[in-house]
Image (cartoon, helix red, strand yellow):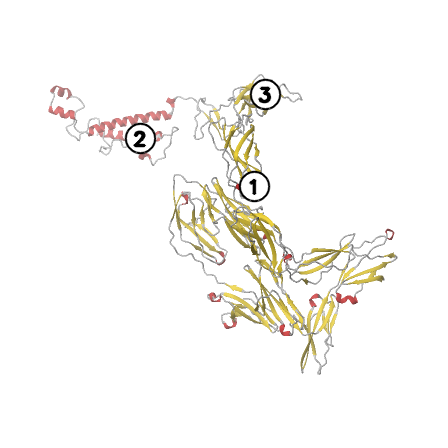
Amino acid sequence: MTCEAKGNPKPEFWWTKNGEEFDPYQDPRLIKEKNSGTFVIPNTGNLTEYQGTYRCYASNKLGTAITEEVEFVVPHVPKFPKEKIDPIEVEEGQPVILECNPPKGIPPLQIYWMTIGLQHIEQDDRVSIGLNGDLFFSNALEKDSHRDYCCFAAFPKIRTIVQKNAMSVIVKSTNSIMERKPSLLMPSGVKSETQLVKGDELLLECIAEGFPTPMIEWLRIDHRLPDRVTIENHGKLLSIDQVDEDDKGKYMCKATNIHGMAVHYFDVSVEEPPQWVSEPESQLSMIGSDVLINCSATGTPQPTIQWMVNGKPIEGMFSVYLNKTSNSTDSAVYQCEASNRHGTLLANANIMIMKEGLEYSAVEGKVIVMHCKVFSSPPSAVTWNKEDSTGSLEGPRFTVHQNGSLEIYNVEKEDMGQYTCYTKNTEGTSAITALLDVKGIQLNKIKHFLKHPSLGPSQLSCLAMYDNSFSGDFEIVWEKDDMEIALNHTENSGPFGKGLGQIGDWPVCLTLSTEFIIEYEESQWEPGTWRELQRVPGNHGSAVLKLYGHVNYRFRVSGVNTVGRGRPSEPTERYKTPPAAPDKNPENIKIEGHLPHEMDINWEPLSPIEHNGPGLEYKVSYKRQHVEEDWQEHVVKRHSFVVKDTPTFVPYEIRIQARNHHGWGPEPKVVTGYSGEDFPSAAPDDVAVEVMNNSLVKVSWMRVHKDKLHGHLGGYRISWWRLRSLLDSKKTHGDKHTLTFPGDRNHAMVPGLTPFSEYSLIIMTFNRRGNGPGSHAVNFKTPEGVPEKTPVFRVTDVQKHTVTLTWAPPLEANGVLTGYLLEYQLINNTEEVGVLQTVDISNPDTTMWVLQNLEAISRYKFYLRPCTRVGCGPRVSKESTTTPEAHKGVTPNISEAVNSSKTFHVIEGLELGTVYTVRLMTNNWVDNTSIFEYVIRTRAKVRISTQGWFIGLMCVAALLTLMVLIACFVNRNKGGKYSVKEKEDLHPDLESQGIHDDTFCEYSDNDEKPLKGSQHSLDGQIKAEGSGDSLVDYGDEDIQFNEDGSFIGEYAGRKEKKVSMEVKGTTNQSTA
């Protein structure tokens, strides 16, 4: 805690904490510094007990100086409260807000939303983090369902990051999301106020919900957005760095989607912490003189002034006035403290009241001797010191002579002040004071014009400004070549001197400027800036100035003659005018209504210099016009006022009067304005459309009554859209077009329509608030017109005597297409051109034409125009030169339009063993580029019986057939005795029995004995499932697919191997 001060005698230091006396020397834990008020609080873990507001005092016998208050804060580690957060369930499409509510801590605060795995939540137009740290979803989607939304709050200054408990969001899917117009999630309401301090960053935020996701647009009412505006967070955040007075006003955000819009208005005001207009100045005065200490500050809101003497408050004073100070005990340190809600300023002024002593005056740059006569026995030692120094005067410019006198060489402005001569011997000490005043003098060399004697007299001028105290010693001396010359006379007039003389044999008439320019500079609001105040004729040496009150002026004068303007004089001493009531009222009063039931009153404030004194305020008075009622009055400090709860759009009388602590300004003028506007409530009636031609219509309507406008009429807006081409029976809603027609009118022209179309049209009125309702839609049709030009026209095949032309139909036929007009002519490189030949193509579906009987090696130009029943449209042209010999042309084959939903197309009729180029192009032939292009070669004709894949396929089929037959025999054998055998056992047929004795296919009496020719499995067991073939058997192998997408080849290879093993096993069994 630093506190340093100097003074004579040396000051003593003491502190207060929270308004009570605090002695650092009583606490052994604190580290103190000698001859200083500074002490150190060591960070030993117990800083909390030292929290508070401190102020340092430095005192000696002449007074007490104080510092501004210092607040010492020990921050606590911020923490989120432990809480159980229930899952949030929401239907798809509905808005969601996840609240963060970060703990308080040392700014700046940074908010992050992440998952438990520290994956950032992606932000876009739909999802965003607000300035308050909450996570907003304009409309929730199923993909937003998570169980680990976490808010992290970071405090960089204390290097701390804290995490909130995870939140769960469950989005329930729906078959269809209900669309809706926007509404604002942040901020709430229609209007809000934002107050900032000059230099702060302006942050305005609008977050909207709706479906589809709304888009945000920012506007500034009655002004364009400043160039320093930055739009961030996907359009939801407006920021302006380092705001100033020009940035205040009304801003609006507008959230829109296809279903409507929502708006919010921001009233931004910019305030300022206190700034000194005039600081109290230290003064040295004699007993019996008057002392006035002034102190004023500016700021928004206007700062309050608190005076203190030696740190003790003085109540109810705007300035300190000491009337005819009686003795030196009035010497003290006076403090002026200016404060508003944005800050505090403190200044100390040392006021010293001295016994009257010797007074000396000196001129800058000269020498002064101040005497100190002393008689004593024994002899005394003499020393000199200055009021603001602690030791004797030393340095090359100061000499103390043996007689006690002090001589100062090359006197400077800083030498002004009180000096004390101290004498001391063994019997005691004595002292005497002297007051030195340092004055300056300036020679103002005004431009002169020196001419040759033959051209007339030369004029030289010399004007000097000097202090009145030197009037008896003032003279002007002219020199030529370092030799003094005589002047006819010298004039002394107040603080100015003029000289007239003769140079050589030339008569010299010294003339003053044709006029003087008086400029002023004040120290409060524009220090260092000089402004012209008044012009005075050249024969005047003084002027009476009209000045503002409560301003610390200084002045300078410059002369102007026929040659130009001279350099200005040295500035005068400061002159402080006394405060007074304002002598003017605000001007440029504007009455506006941005919202219904409100009236905004703004005016151009008085400039600071026009305040004439502290405490400037404005009295706003208003009442309804032509209504017997009292004036409503409000006193405000800023230059705007909003009248609430007014009727919509009614006239008011307004007057504004300025006042300060010293009185009211003059009687104000009355101005008239209207309260806030609302949207028009009625649409124009009797809307009619008159078709002027195929692209222009005249729209007429009946004006909206003024009682339904609810504001100043802005004009009318006509909106129209195309329903369909008359060639198409299906209606669609085309793009909407709007034209605005300002002013009061009842008809307008709508151009740029497409011929042979059906349109729909509405009209609405608007005011400053916005659009009124639309009228009933009126449908109309435009007549047929000529087509647009064909978008594609190409020469595709050029021969010796023929040329093939291809084209695409016009994008807009503007009627019923009847055909094409094809023209061509010879244009060889000569000035003459051939006769224009015409071909009338009557088939509108034709897109290719072959021109024959052309001359070889000749250049032709071809023209094509599409036509309707009304006429032919604009033509397009191409040039081409025929070839010297005929050659085989290649005409591309064009398929029918391919359905865009398909991913393949079959091309038939290709020749074997031929190379083709295949292109996929757009149907309307707008350009030459192809979407897809590939070169293929068709296969040559081959005998299928020689193909390996065919032979393999046949082998597999044979093997499969064999396996099926074997399986049938196995199943038959597995069945045991058959019903036929049982019948034969019951009814033996001897004749049949004899026949079968010698057959090779006998029934077995043993169930385990196989049939002859039957097949066993390799392990001797027969499976009941039949064939064991399965795709699972082939799952571990890489299966190669054939061209038809099958895997027969691989399947055949494996099965063939398996079958051969089974057959081999059967053979072994039979052999055994």
Instruction: Look at the image and tell me whether residue 1066 can be seen.
Output: yes
Q: Secondary structure at mark 3?
A: strand
- In the rendered view, tell whether residue 179 sits above or below residue 457: above
User: Where residue 206 sits: x, y (%)?
Assistant: 49, 47
Identify which amino acid the numbered label 1 is placed on: Leu
In the rendered image, which residue does mark 3 sit on? 823
In the rendered image, which residue does mark 1 sit on? 713
Q: Residues within 10 Å of mark 3 (few under 14, many from 20)?
A: some
Instruction: Look at the image and tell me whether residue 246 can be seen.
Output: no
Q: Residues within 10 Å of mark 1 (few under 14, many from 20)?
A: some
> Split into 4 quadrants, where in the image is the C terminus?
top left
Q: Secondary structure at mark 1?
A: loop
Give whichever of discs 2 and 3 has the lower sequence position: 3
Question: Which is closer to the viewer, label 2 or label 1?
Answer: 1
User: Where residue 83 sits: x, y (%)?
Assistant: 39, 55
Question: Which is closer to the viewer, label 3 or label 1?
Answer: 1
Give whichever of discs 2 and 1 has the lower sequence position: 1
> Split into 4 quadrants, where in the image is the N terminus?
bottom right
User: Could you tell me if the residues under marks 2 and 3 are in contact, i.e. CB atoms within 8 Å?
Assistant: no
Q: Residue at 65%, 74% (x, y): give it.
A: 326
In the rendered image, which residue does mark 2 sit on? 1055
Question: Which is closer to the viewer, label 2 or label 3?
Answer: 3
- In the rendered view, tell whether residue 181 sits above or below residue 57: above
- In the rendered view, tell whether residue 162 sits above or below residue 386: above
Q: Secondary structure at mark 2?
A: helix
Q: Residue furthest toward the front?
A: 628
Identify which amino acid the numbered label 2 is placed on: Lys
- Which quadrant of the figure has residue 692? top right
Identify which amino acid the numbered label 3 is placed on: Glu
User: Where residue 418 sits: x, y (%)?
Assistant: 68, 71
Give whichever of discs 3 and 1 has the lower sequence position: 1
